[in-house]
């Protein structure tokens, strides 16, 4: 007669197997580092103090540890730690692991929300993939001054985490008026309109998947009546709906980008 294994023991075994699977997969995933310099096979790269601290103190990499490096232009390279100290770390580049991919031709024009909500918008939209961020200052935009250096750091960290090779640009803030004046005569702006009931985003995108797409998301308090009139009279703006629910601006930006990426794939 075979001995039955108690249910609790089976559950514990299953939990152990799941945790072991997660652990081994995390261990296999190499650290990715963005560098703004030229990368070449069989060359050496010197990391600065901040990057060296991240490598040695945060990620606990030691001499001989492998990592991946990219610069948003030349693809991705496999490297290993040759030596490290508190001041610098030297990385030996080996071979290219991935060629540079083509950046998605999507631009997000958005009215910056305040505080952590702006950070969240930048982080999640970077993970989803786009070409550029365009901060637009409308009449009802509350956050009129953004810290570009801090937001660029969030963009880079998000690219490192999400396994992306293309690093989105963060353009200078522009007024709504200057934003509309900068548009080309044949450019189309896809406007996520809280007042629209048009379920037409698929139709707008399917016409030309290779063209440049500019998503526009308004501020928390919506555009002013003057700005809305300008949008209504400008044939380059195409309104679409994200549903009946009233969304925060960062949620609307993420939802719009998810939909557009899905339709373009």
Image (tube, helix red, strand yellow):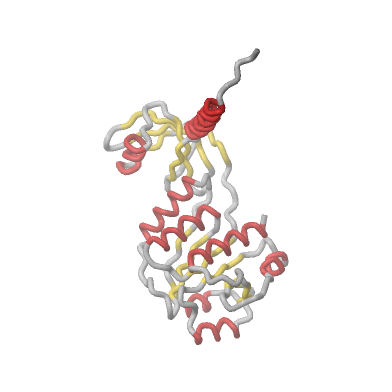
Q: Residue furthest top?
A: 1
The foreground one among 223 and 30 is 223
Quarter of the rendering containing residue 81: top left
The foreground one among 158 and 248 is 248
**Whether residue 141 is situated above or below residue 6 in the rendered picture:** below
Q: Is residue 128 visible?
A: yes
**Whether residue 222 is situated above or below residue 212 in the rendered picture:** below
Quarter of the figure that contains the N terminus = top right
Q: Residue at x 53, y 66 (%)?
A: 252
Q: Residue at x 69, y 71 (%)?
A: 200
Q: Residue furthest front?
A: 1
Q: Is residue 94 visible?
A: no
Judged left or right of residue 195, residue 157 is left
Quarter of the rendering containing residue 193: bottom right
Residue 15: where, in percent of width, then height?
52, 31
Residue 256: where, in percent of width, then height?
58, 64
């Amino acid at each position: 007669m075979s001995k039955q294994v108690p249910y609790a023991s089976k559950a514990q075994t299953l939990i152990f197997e799941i945790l072991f699977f997660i652990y081994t997969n995390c261990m296999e995933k190499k650290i990715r580092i963005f560098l703004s310099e030229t990368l070449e096979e069989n060359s050496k790269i010197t990391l600065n103090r901040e990057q060296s601290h991240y490598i040695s103190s945060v990620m606990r990499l030691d001499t001989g540890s492998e990592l991946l490096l990219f610069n948003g232009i030349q693809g991705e390279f496999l490297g290993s730690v040759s030596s490290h100290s508190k001041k610098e770390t030297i990385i030996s580049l080996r071979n290219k692991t991935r060629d540079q991919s083509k950046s998605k031709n999507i631009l997000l024009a958005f009215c910056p929300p305040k505080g952590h909500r702006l950070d969240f918008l930048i982080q999640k939209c970077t993970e989803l993939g786009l070409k550029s961020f365009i901060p637009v200052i409308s009449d009802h935009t509350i956050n009129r001054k953004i810290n570009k250096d801090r937001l660029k750091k969030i963009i880079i960290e998000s690219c490192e985490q999400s396994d992306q090779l293309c690093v989105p640009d963060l353009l200078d803030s522009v007024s709504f008026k200057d934003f509309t004046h900068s548009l080309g005569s044949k450019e189309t702006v896809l406007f996520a309109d809280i007042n629209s009931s048009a379920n037409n985003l698929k139709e707008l995108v399917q016409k030309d998947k290779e063209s440049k797409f500019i998503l526009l998301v308004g501020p928390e308090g919506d555009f002013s009546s003057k700005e809305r009139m300008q949008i209504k009279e400008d044939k380059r703006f195409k309104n679409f709906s994200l549903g009946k629910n009233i969304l925060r601006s960062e949620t609307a930006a993420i939802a719009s980008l998810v939909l557009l990426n899905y339709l373009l794939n």
